[in-house]
Amino acid sequence: MITNLDESINSVLKKSRNLPISALVKSTYVRCNALLNKRGREVATMLASSQLYMEVLNKVIKDALRKTNAHTILEFYQCDTRFLVQETINLREVRLTGDFTIKLEERWCDCGKFQKLHMLCSHVVATCKHAHHEYINYIHPVCTLESVSNVCR
């Protein structure tokens, strides 16, 4: 059985069967270098306009802030920063509303988004609001524009 990776590699290499390996490596290098240069210029522009995070993360933060109005903090243990958050309305209706446990010190939430994507979920933002924490402290440093800028150099 052919995997998706095999299919994608075959589709790329199909047009270049008669080329020597050095030509393939060179063309791939040129494309990657051009892409990194373009992305580096975009990030430099965003940094110059004093943005802290990538556009994707800005949208995630706005979405999470909008959803926090539909969450209620049921229980919290201030000493170990564990919280139980209940969704009263699920705006996306992808999954059922329910109760979610958040462990801020471990950067963990039952929904899975917080630990898998290293991005804020609405449950964490609601918890931070309740505990008077800055939710920005829980954004992974990899998501900052400065980190992206270091990769593009």
Image (cartoon, rainbow, N blue to C red):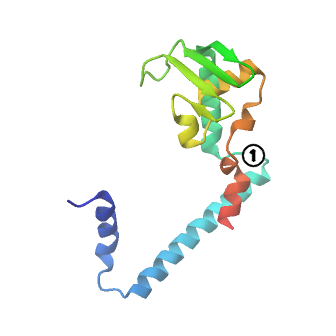
The amino acid type, in three-letter code, at marker 1 is Gln
Q: Quadrant of the C terminus?
A: bottom right
Q: Quadrant of residue 95?
A: top left
At x 28%, y 63%, the residue is 7
- Residue at left 53%, top 77%? 30
From the top left corner, tell me how far across and down residue 14 is, in percent. 28, 73
Q: How many marks?
A: 1
Residue 77 relative to residue 4: left or right: right
Q: Is mark 1 on a helix, strand or loop?
A: loop
**Which of the 4 quarters of the picture holds residue 148?**
bottom right
Give x and y (percent) for residue 120: 62, 34
Task: Note whether 16 is above or below 32 in the view shown.
Answer: below
Q: Which quarter of the rendering shows the N terminus?
A: bottom left
Q: How crowded is mark 1: few (under 14 residues within 10 Å), some or many (20 or more)?
A: some
**Residue sitting at x 73%, y 21%:** 129
Residue 53, x across and y down, in percent: 70, 45
Q: Residue 104 falls in which quadrant of the image?
A: top right
Looking at the picture, does residue 104 appear above or below residue 3? Answer: above
Residue identified by numbered label 1: 51
Residue at the extreme left of the image, as rendered: 1
State whether residue 144 is above or below residue 44: above
Q: Nearer the viewer, residue 142 or 78?
A: 78
25 or 125, nearer to the observer: 125
Q: Is residue 120 above or below residue 78?
A: below
Q: Nearer the viewer, residue 87 or 60?
A: 87
**Residue 22 image point, x, y percent:** 44, 87
Residue ranking furthest to the front: 79
Q: Residue at x 34, y 70 (%)?
A: 12
